[in-house]
């Protein structure tokens, strides 16, 4: 099994008539000027590819961490169908409190099969703002 | 709402052979073009709003059983077929029914079925409330 991609975005949706996925406002980092902050919502999107066409169900474990501290954990059923090799996972995470700078990571693990991980840098941009020149 | 099985297929007051659907079927030069056009068509949306997957399969089977007298009579069959692209990928019974349809009466029927089958990727969508968990 392989991970086609895993990423975080503000929202994602699946079109009713085409079953195609749309991902809006991909998040690659989180700039902060002060802490703590609350991120209202992040959507974790992963596309997994099975080795062959088969209808099979797995139970994955999803875990969100800020640095080494676990902030969310839960089981996620992942289903593959006979007609294809792909499965999608869309997880909406509401109200993420950030108390420290570092790496916010989200990982979906299907034990013994695959890890799909997305990492976001929580940056302290306050340090990087150059001082205003004095006249 | 009830689907009419007459030659001029309709659902309630809505005819499925809309002008735009007819135009799509008559001018399409590839199956994927026809699929994309019909997916956006109001006729397909009407079918999706009013019929279940099994009802759509039954209506399609009924439409295919009749010999079309003109190209425009193929329109409802293509509308039903394209509407099946919204079938739940995890509904194995429905996809078995879809696979068993004899689409030889539609020039691009088999190709469109192959396209919608390839797009039927199952999606797991869940919500987590992080605040609740981190406060535990």
Image (cartoon, helix red, strand yellow):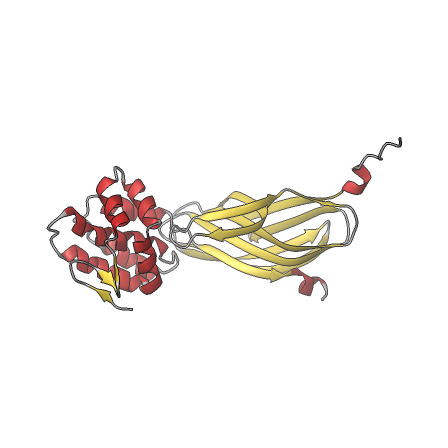
Return the x and y of residue A35 as percentages of the image width and height.
78, 51
| A45 and A32: which is toward the camera | A32
Q: Is residue A68 left or right of residue A9?
A: right
- Count how many numbered circles sit on residues in the image: 0
Q: Is residue A40 visible?
A: yes
| Image quadrant assignment for residue B127 | bottom right
| A60 and B28: which is toward the camera | B28
Q: Residue at x 53, y 54 (%)?
A: A90
Which residue of the protein is positioned furthest toward the bottom in this rendering? B1
Q: Residue at x 69, y 62 (%)?
A: B131
Q: Is residue B41 left or right of residue B133?
A: left
Q: Is residue A119 left or right of residue B123?
A: right
Up-down relation of residue B91 to residue A87 (above or below): below
Q: Residue at x 57, y 48 (%)?
A: A115
Return the x and y of residue A43 as percentages of the image width and height.
58, 52
| Image quadrant assignment for residue A123 | top right
Q: Residue at x 61, y 57 (%)?
A: A93
Where is the N terminus of chain B found, in terms of image quarters? bottom left
Up-down relation of residue B108 to residue A61 (above or below): above
Where is the C terminus of chain B found, in terms of image quarters? bottom right
Up-down relation of residue B93 to residue A82 (above or below): below
Return the x and y of residue A29 as percentages of the image width and height.
67, 43
């Amino acid at each position: 099994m392989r991970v086609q991609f895993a990423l975080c975005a503000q929202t994602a949706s699946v079109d009713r008539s085409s079953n195609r996925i749309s991902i809006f406002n991909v998040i690659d980092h989180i700039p902060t000027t002060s802490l703590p902050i609350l991120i209202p919502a992040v959507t974790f999107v992963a596309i997994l590819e099975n080795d062959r066409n088969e209808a099979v169900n797995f139970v994955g474990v999803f875990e969100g961490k800020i640095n080494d501290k676990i902030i969310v954990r839960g089981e996620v059923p992942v289903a593959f169908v006979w007609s294809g090799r792909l499965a999608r996972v869309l997880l909406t995470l509401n109200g993420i409190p950030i108390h420290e700078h570092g790496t916010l990571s989200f990982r979906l693990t299907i034990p013994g099969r695959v890890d799909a991980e997305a990492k976001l840098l929580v940056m302290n941009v306050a340090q990087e703002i150059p001082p205003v020149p004095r006249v | 709402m009830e689907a009419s099985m007459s030659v001029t297929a309709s659902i309630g007051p809505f005819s499925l052979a809309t002008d735009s659907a007819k135009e799509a079927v008559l001018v399409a030069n590839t199956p994927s073009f026809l699929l994309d056009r019909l997916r956006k068509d109001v006729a397909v949306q009407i079918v999706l709003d009013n019929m279940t997957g099994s009802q759509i399969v039954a209506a399609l089977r009924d439409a295919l059983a009749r010999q079309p007298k003109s190209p425009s009579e193929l329109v409802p069959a293509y509308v039903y077929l394209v509407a099946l692209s919204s079938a739940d990928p995890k509904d194995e019974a429905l996809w078995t029914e879809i696979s068993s349809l004899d689409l030889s009466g539609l020039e691009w029927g088999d190709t469109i079925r192959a396209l919608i089958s390839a797009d039927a990727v199952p999606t797991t969508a869940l919500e987590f409330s992080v605040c609740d968990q981190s406060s535990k």
